[in-house]
Image (cartoon, rainbow, N blue to C red):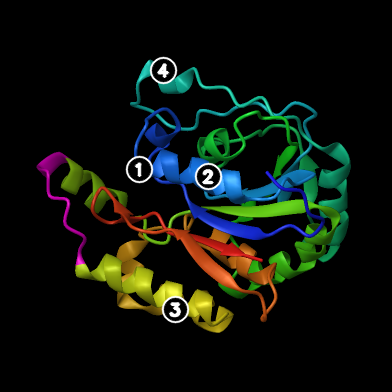
Amino acid sequence: MPIQSRMPALFIGHGNPMNAITDNHWSRAFQSLGQELPTPKAVLAISAHWYVPGTFTTGNDQPETIHDFGGFPRELFQVQYPAPGETQLAKEVVDLLGKHGAAVRFDWGLDHGTWSVLCHMMPKADIPVIQLSIDRDLPFTEYAEIGRAISGLREEGVMIIGSGNITHNLRDAFSRMTSGDGATPDWARAFDEDVASAITQHDVTFLSRASETQSGRISHPTWDHYVPLLYVMGAVGQAEEVRFPITGFDMGSLSMRAALFG
């Protein structure tokens, strides 16, 4: 991977945890994306799966690989992603987010929203990684504010990655997988396209109000997989180019769209 100082910012649809151990369209897309990204000094990941009251960073020198799911094959629970942590970066993030009452925590690590994509994008696991929690109690407008507060880290060689899915109605997705119906419903396609258009236009106002739309409410029974996008949108500039290196739907209605800025 080429080396540059200012890092891009990325939102990526991580989808099914099985993508970590399955050779499929999505795992190959993660691999290809990783090969074209520059090499960061560290990664700051905002994962849908650390969705708690409060804003925290992981402070572990050696973050645990967290298997935060159930009902999957034993092979998936054996996956380890032994990337080091970065204590100084964790403290810097807390300082940048002073008014948000951020703190360092040591009881979390790297959950599958982070490692299931990084194991393909950065397979050597030699780049330091910390996670930033999603404060589930904040209004949507404040997620982008947090992103803006940490945007300067990109100038220091830190890659900011938000990991979730633009559409994430698991009840619908699993029913389609069970029935063999791989068709993408109109509501999923409409929300994915509306969000992609807003991303292209850097329309953070629309993105922050997406929960008010009918297609948005169907796409997200809960909003944990959507709000990592808002952090990323706050961390990028209005003039930054964006492209979508990964698009499409898994399990019928699960958008796997990735948005790459810079």
Q: Mark 3 is on which residue type?
A: Ser
Q: Position of residue 129 (x, y in %)?
A: 71, 39
User: Going from the N terminus, do you reach mark 1 or mark 2 first?
Assistant: 1
Task: Magenta stretch: give its range.
Answer: 178-185
Give the CA distance from mark 4 to mark 2: 20 Å
User: Which residue is labeled 2 in the image?
Assistant: 49
Circle on res. 134: none
Residue found 78% across the figure and 67% down from its top? 149
Above or below 187: residue 202:
below
User: Going from the N terminus, do you reach mark 1 or mark 4 first?
Assistant: 1
User: Which residue is labeled 1 in the image?
Assistant: 25
Residue found 60% across the figure and 58% down from its top? 10
Question: Which of labels 3 and 2 is toward the front?
Answer: 3
Give the CA distance from mark 4 to mark 3: 38 Å
Total numbered badges shown on the rendered structure: 4
Q: Tell whether 226 sits left or right of 134.
A: left
Location of the N terminus (image quadrant): top right
* Residue 57 lies in quadrant: top right
